[in-house]
Image (cartoon, rainbow, N blue to C red):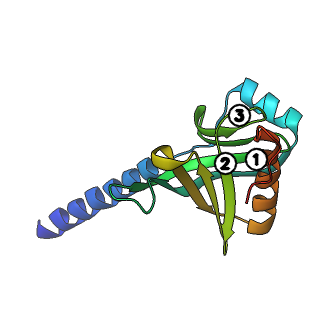
Amino acid sequence: MRGCVSRSRFGWTLLGAVIGSLACHQETGRLTPDQEQRLAAEGILHRADNLRFRWTEGAGRRGGTWEDRLASIVVTRRSVLIHKNAKVGVEITPGGARHYEVHRDGDRVRISIGSGRSSETWSFAAPDSADAWTRDIRAVIRLSSPHGASPQ
């Protein structure tokens, strides 16, 4: 009888582990048909789904916070979209009024949004050339800059 209890516990433990691993895998790359169509028309340069982003608010300041967020990113010739399915986290487009910067640190790409107390940063490990991601995001930021300023 004891053998049956062990196998039963093992079975439940295994089942719990399988269910847990399925629940932890989240799909973040689904967009609405309209979003997909617009991004395709703009010419997709980079796309990565289910990336772990480090989101930081108030970096380097007292009371600053950060968290890891699972999200997807699409970079086109005209926009940058960080999203979790159809929910937009960040969208950089021509005519945007906010201040943006992009920097590369090794294989990580860091996108800074806003300034002062309202600033936030989205950082991710590029799945391929961090240089190419940074260059193409920087080109979109130039389009969104009100005076055509060259961001860092």
For marks 1 and 3 on the same chain, the one whose residue lies earlier in the sequence: 3
Name which residue lies at 42% across and 55% down.
67
Q: Locate residue 71 relative to residue 81 in the image: left or right.
A: left
* Residue 66 in the image, given as x and y percentages of width and height: 41, 56
Does 57 sit above or below residue 36?
Answer: below
Mark 2 Cα within 10 Å, few/some/many (few <14, many 20+)? many
Residue located farthest toward the top when viewing the structure as drawn: 34
Task: Give the labeled residue for mark 2.
Answer: 100
For marks 1 and 2 on the same chain, the one whose residue lies earlier in the sequence: 2
* Residue 149 in the image, given as x and y percentages of width and height: 80, 48
Dot 1: element = helix
Q: What residue type is labelled 2?
A: Tyr
Give the distance between the C-alpha atoms of the residues marked 2 and 3, in whole angstroms: 9 Å
Q: Which amino acid does label 3 sit on?
A: Gly
Task: Give the labeled residue for mark 1.
Answer: 141
Q: What residue type is labelled 1?
A: Ile
Dot 2: element = strand
Q: Do the residues labelled 1 and 2 touch (CB within 8 Å)?
A: yes
Give the distance between the C-alpha atoms of the residues marked 1 and 3, in whole angstroms: 9 Å
Dot 3: element = loop
Q: In which quarter of the image is the C terminus?
A: bottom right
* Residue 80 in the image, given as x and y percentages of width and height: 72, 43
Give the distance between the C-alpha atoms of the residues marked 1 and 2, in whole angstroms: 6 Å
* Residue 43 in the image, given as x and y percentages of width and height: 88, 41
Query: In the picture, residue 86 is in which quadrant?
Result: top right
Task: Give the labeled residue for mark 3.
Answer: 96
Q: Locate residue 115 relative to residue 61 in the image: left or right.
A: right
Q: Can residue 129 be seen in this view?
A: no
**Residue in front for this viewpoint, 46 or 139:** 139
